[in-house]
Image: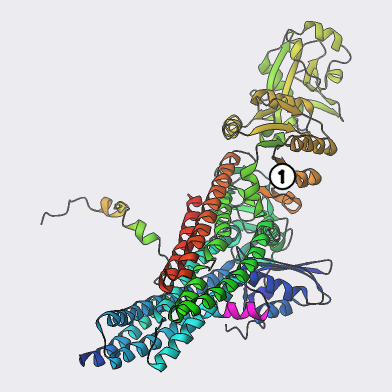
Amino acid sequence: MTAKSATLSHPLLEGHWASEADGEGHVVFAAEGIHCANCARSIRSTLDALPGIKRADVNVVNSRVSVSWDTSQLKLGTILGKVAQLGFKPVPLVGEAAALAQRDERRAALKRIGLAALGSMQVMMYAGGLYAGAFTGIDASMAEILRYTCWLITTPVLFYSGAPILRGGLHDLRRRVLGMDVTVSLALVLAYLASAYNTLRGSGEVYFDSVAMFILFLLVGRYYEMRGRHQAANVTDALTKALPTTVQRIDRDSGQAERIELSAVHIGDWLRVGSGQVIPVDGKVATGVALVDESLVTGEAEPARRHSGDVLLGGSLNAGAALTLEVTRSAGESTLHGLVRLLERAQSERPRLGLAAERMASWFVVRVLILTTLVGIVWTFVDPDRAFPAVLAVLVATCPCALSLATPVAIAAATSRMARLGVLVMRSDAVEGLAKIDTLMLDKTGTLTQGKAQIRRINVHGDLTREHALAVAAALESASQHPLAAAFREHGGEKLVCDDTHEHAGLGIEGTVAGTRWRIGRAEFALRGRSSESHAGDSDAGDSDAGDIVLADEAGNHARFHIADALREDAVATMANLRALDLEIELASGDRPQTVAQVAAELGIEKAAGALRPEEKLANLRALQQAGHRVLMVGDGINDGPVLAAADVSMAMGRGSSIAHAAGDLLLLRESLSSLPQAVEVARRSLVIVRQNLRWSAAYNMSAIPLAAVGLMPPWVAAIGMSLSSLLVVFNARRILR
Amino acid sequence: MESVYLLIPISIVLVGAAVWAFFWAVNRGQFENLEDPAELALEEDRLIESDQDANSNPPPRS
C-alpha cells in the first residue's frame, strides 16, 4: 500500500479502531514520524483548525494521536488525510498493521544508519589523507581528488540519511518555531556548502567528515530513542495484540460451530474458546467451570477459577479445558479496548513536564544562534581562518539533544517497567509525583482483604457443636442469594437438608433441619427477643458484634458466627514493604467502621476511620497536605473524583466495567496492593536517573560551548561529544527497566 | 602514486557494493532481532527428549 492510496482503503477506516457515540467519533492511532514536541504541536494545531474537531491530543513519547470529532461535520478519512499531509503516516495502534509500521520505521532508520556509517568511515579515510597532507605536503591534484571524493560520498549521506533532520528543520522554520532540528540542519548545511565551495575553489578547509559523522551519531541516538518509544507504545499494544481475528460461534439450538470475524460477534452469542486460546471478547461463563489466566489485563500470574455466570475478560487466556462463553459486550466495547482507549486518551494529554521542556528549547535555540553569530564576528577580527570552524563547532556543541532526551526517555522506561507490575501510568508526571510521596491514604479496605465473607469465629452455647451448627447453617443458607450465605456454603462438612425454608427479607432464614426448627440471621431475629438472656450466657460476651449472625433453635441452643473478611496473605508483607520505604499509611474509608477498625488493628495502622463521606476524606487529605505531606490516594475512581483530583498523586482501582470510570494518575489493574512498594521504588529510581541525565547533559553543553567558541574543539569532536552524550542519556534510562 | 587514481574509484565502487548488501540484508529482515542471538550463545545445550528415548544403544565411539 503506497502512501497515496492510504486514504482509500486505510486499515483505520475498517475494524474497530474508531468508535462512535451520540454523534461524537473517537479514534486513537499512531502517527509515524513524530520525534519531537514540535511535530506534536504541528499535528495538534492543524487538527484543531478543522471544523467539527472537539479534541485532538498528541503524545510525543509513544506517537499517539487521540481525536474526538463531530461526525456530522467531519469524516475520519479527512482527519487521517490531514495528518498524512503533514508528513506523518497514520497507522493503527495494534495488530498486524501497527507491527508492520513499527518494523518499517525501524528498517528505514537502520538503512539510514548503515549508509551514514559506511559513508562516514570512507570519508574519514579520505579526509585522513587530507589531514596528513596538511602536515607532510600533498600534491594539489591529489588533494583535489580527495576533496571531490569526500564530497561525492557525503552527498547521499546528507540527503538520504540526513533527510529526516533536514525535513524537521524545514518544518520548524515554516511554522516559525525554533526547534533543535533548526540548529542541527543549519550546522550541516553550512558545513556542506562551505566545503563544496572550497572544493570548487581548490583551497581551504573541507568539513565533509564532520558532516557525515555528525549525521551518523545523531541517527544512532535517535534510533535508540525510537526503540524506547516503540517499547513504551508496546506496553499498551500487548493488551490487544493477542486478540484473534476470527472466533468460533456456537449455534445454541443445533450445537454447530461456525467461524466468524471478531467484529461480527453480537451480544448474546455463544462462543467456544479452546484450551490455551485467548478469550476474544468480554462475556460470562455459559457452562461449567473455567480456569483463566488474566495476567494480560491485570498482571496477576495465578490463574483464577470462574464459575457459571462469572465474568470473563477479553484478552485473558483460557488456561483450562475448552469453554463456552456468552458474549456480554461487542469486540469494540470490550474491557480491553476500553482500557486501551482510556490509557491513550489519558496519555495524550499534554504533560506539564513536556510543555516546560518545549518552552525551554525555543529559548535555548535563540540564545544559541545569538552566541554563534557573536563567536563568528569575534573570530573574524582575531583570525578569519578560524572563524568558520569555530562557528560550526559552537552550533554542534550547543545542540541540546541530550537535554531534550533526558526526561522523556526515563519516563518511557519507567512506564514500561511499572506496567509489568500491573500499574498503568496514565499521566507522565505521575511518575515524578509517585517518587515524592511520603503518605498513603487508602480508601478501599478491599485492597487489603480478600473480598470474601468468611466465618472467622464460632461461639456455641448450649447443646450444640460447632460442626453441627455449621452444617445446619449451611443447610439453611443453601438456597439464599444473600452475600453472606456464600460464607456458609463453603463450609458444609455434613450435608444436611433443610425443609420448609422461609426467608425473611433483611432479617434471616428459618427452616426445619432434622426435625428441629432453626432460625439464622440477626440476633434479634434468631433469638426472638431473648438476646438479653443469651448475653448473660455468653462466655465471650466482649467479642460479640452487632453484625454477627446467630443460629438458634427453639430450645435456646445457639451459635454466634463472626463473619468478616480475612486479610490477604500479602497484606502484611505489603504494609511492611511500604513502611520500609518511609511511607505513612492511613485508612480513610467509606467502608463500615468495624471492618476498617479490624483491618487497621491487624495491620498496625494507627490512623484509621470508616464510614467517611467524600467531604470528610477531602478534609483529611487537605489536613495532611497542609502539614506538608505529599499524599498518594488509592481509591475507587468512580465516586472519589474530587478526592483523587486533590491528592498529589492518585491511584484508581480499575477492573472490568469500572475501567471506563477510572480517573486517576495511576491505574491499578490488580486486586491487591502488593506491587505498589515496587512501583514506588521504580518511580524514585527514575527521578534519580532523570536528575543524572539532566546534570550530565547540562555539564556537557556547558563545558563544550566555551571550548568550541575558543576554537579548541574541532567540529568533528563536537559532533562525537554531542551524540555520545545523547547515547549516554538513553542507556542510563534503560537501567530503570531492570 | 598513480595507482591511487585507480584505487580511489575502486574504493567508491566497493562502498557502493557494501551499502547495497546492507540494504539487502535489512530488507530481508536480518536485523529484526539484535538482542536474542547474544543470549542464545550463553544458553545451555538442551537435550532433545525424543532422541534420548529412541536411542537405546549409545552412539558408537569414534
Up-down relation of residue A108 to residue A672 (above or below) = below
Where is mark 1, residue-wise?
A: A648
Q: Which residue is drawn at 81% across and 6% down?
A: A536
Up-down relation of residue A524 to residue A398 (above or below) = above
The reply, left or right, for residue B37 in relation to residue A53 is left
**Residue A619, how many percent across, how many down?**
82, 36
**Residue B42, how many percent across, how many down?**
32, 54
Q: Is mark 1 on a helix, strand or loop?
A: loop
Magenta residues: mostly which secondary structure?
Answer: helix
Nearest to the observer: residue A723 or residue A114: A723
Nearest to the observer: residue A519 or residue A153: A153
Nearest to the observer: residue A427 or residue A164: A164
Q: Which residue is drawn at 17% across and 51% down?
A: B58
Is residue A261 among the parts visible in the rendering? no
Up-down relation of residue A152 to residue A388 (above or below) = below
Report the label total: 1
**Residue A698, how many percent across, how many down?**
53, 58
Is residue A121 among the parts visible in the rendering? yes
The reply, left or right, for residue A553 in relation to residue A62 is right
Quarter of the image with the N terminus of chain A is: bottom right
Task: Tell whether position A174 is magenta.
Answer: yes
Going by the numbered disc 1, the residue's amino acid type is Asp
Q: Chain under label 1?
A: A
Where does the magenta region start and end?
A: A167-178
Nearest to the observer: residue A439 or residue B3: B3
Q: Residue at x 23, y 53 (%)?
A: B55
Task: Tell whether position A661 is magenta.
Answer: no
Q: Residue furthest left?
A: B62
Q: Which residue lies furthest to the front in this view?
A: A381
Query: Within the image, what quadrant is residue A62 found in?
Result: bottom right
**Residue A174, how many percent across, how many down?**
66, 81
Up-down relation of residue A516 to residue A615 (above or below) = above
